[in-house]
Image (tube, rainbow, N blue to C red):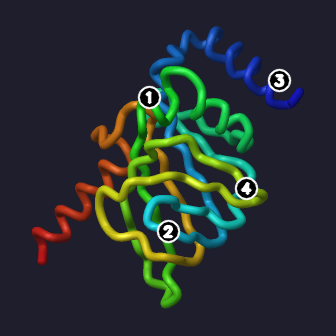
């Protein structure tokens, strides 16, 4: 807990020194896991990494890690919670045949932790989630800005449209 506070204070001090506008950083988040299951309503990331990677694009270009507890607090409380402003996420999954499956989902409710697993109530927007899969990465858009031009899900949607037009 002390390390988290130190990191937050350090970031705040850097923001003050550089004149960086905290609102200019619309962080995207990445959650990796060893496997996944989907029951039609909940995407379970099995043996999920305990840390979530975050990064900001231009002009900020910052990156770091959040503990799962810090991420949970951020997305379950206040006006930027998943319930108030549900973000989209691009989910990339290795199938049993080592094919890559790409799906866009909406994270419309509070995620749940269960041991090493991370459970996300989702609504599938584009593609089809398999009942189970191998290694998975979920790229979560800036909270409150689903399918913005720079969002992971927005980029995924453009690539799928271009692929359809080319074939």
| Image position, residue 136 (x, y; %) | 56, 67
The answer to which of 19 and 132 lies nearer the viewer is 132
Q: Which callout, 3 or 4, points at the residue further toward the start of the chain? A: 3
Question: Label 2, on which residue?
Answer: 39
Q: Could you tell me residue 52's position as x and y percent?
A: 65, 47
Viewer-closest of 102 and 113: 113
Residue 104 placement: quadrant: bottom left
Q: Provide residue 146's location: percent of width, then percent of height.
A: 34, 39
Dot 2 alpha-carbon crowd within 10 angstroms: few under 14, some 14 to 19, many 20 or more:
few
Q: Element type at marker 1?
A: loop
Tag 1 and tag 3, C-beta contact below 8 Å: no
Q: In the image, what residue occupies the spot 71% across and 34% down? A: 70
Q: Marks 4/1: CA distance?
A: 23 Å
Precedes in sequence: disc 1 or disc 3: 3
Q: Is residue 128 left or right of residue 161?
A: right
Q: Which mark is residue 6?
A: 3
Please give the name of the residue rendered at 59% of the width and 26% of the height, measured from the top-left corner.
77
Give the class, few, some or many, for how many residues have Cα within 10 Å of label 1's Cα (few <14, many ≥20): some
**Distance between the Cα atoms at labels 4 and 2?**
16 Å
Q: Which residue is mark 1?
A: 84
Element on which disc 3 rests: helix
Q: Viewer-nearest of labels 3 and 2?
A: 2
Disc 1 and disc 3: Cα gap in Å? Answer: 29 Å
What is the secondary structure assignment of the residue under circle 2?
A: loop
- Mark 3 nearby-residue class (10 Å; few <14, some 14–19, many ≥20): few
Q: Which residue is mark 4?
A: 114
Badges 2 and 1: C-beta atoms under 8 Å apart?
no
Could you classify mark 4 by the number of other residues whose Cα lies within 10 Å: few (under 14), some (14-19), or many (20 or more)? few
- Count of marks overlaid on the render: 4
């Amino acid at each position: 807990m002390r390390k988290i506070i130190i990191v937050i204070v350090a970031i705040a001090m850097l923001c003050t020194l550089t004149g960086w506008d905290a609102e200019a950083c619309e962080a995207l988040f990445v959650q990796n896991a060893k496997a996944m299951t989907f029951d039609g309503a909940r995407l379970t990331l099995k043996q999920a990494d305990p840390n979530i990677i975050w990064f900001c694009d231009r002009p900020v270009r910052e990156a770091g890690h959040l503990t799962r507890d810090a991420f949970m607090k951020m997305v379950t409380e206040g006006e930027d919670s998943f319930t108030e402003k549900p973000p989209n996420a691009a989910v990339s999954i290795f199938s049993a045949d080592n094919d890559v499956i790409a799906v866009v989902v909406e994270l419309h409710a509070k995620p749940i932790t269960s041991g090493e697993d991370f459970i996300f109530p989702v609504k599938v927007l584009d593609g089809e989630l398999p009942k189970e899969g191998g290694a998975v990465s979920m790229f979560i858009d800036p909270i409150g800005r689903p399918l913005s031009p720079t969002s992971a899900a927005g980029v995924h949607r453009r690539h799928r449209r271009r692929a359809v037009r080319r074939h």
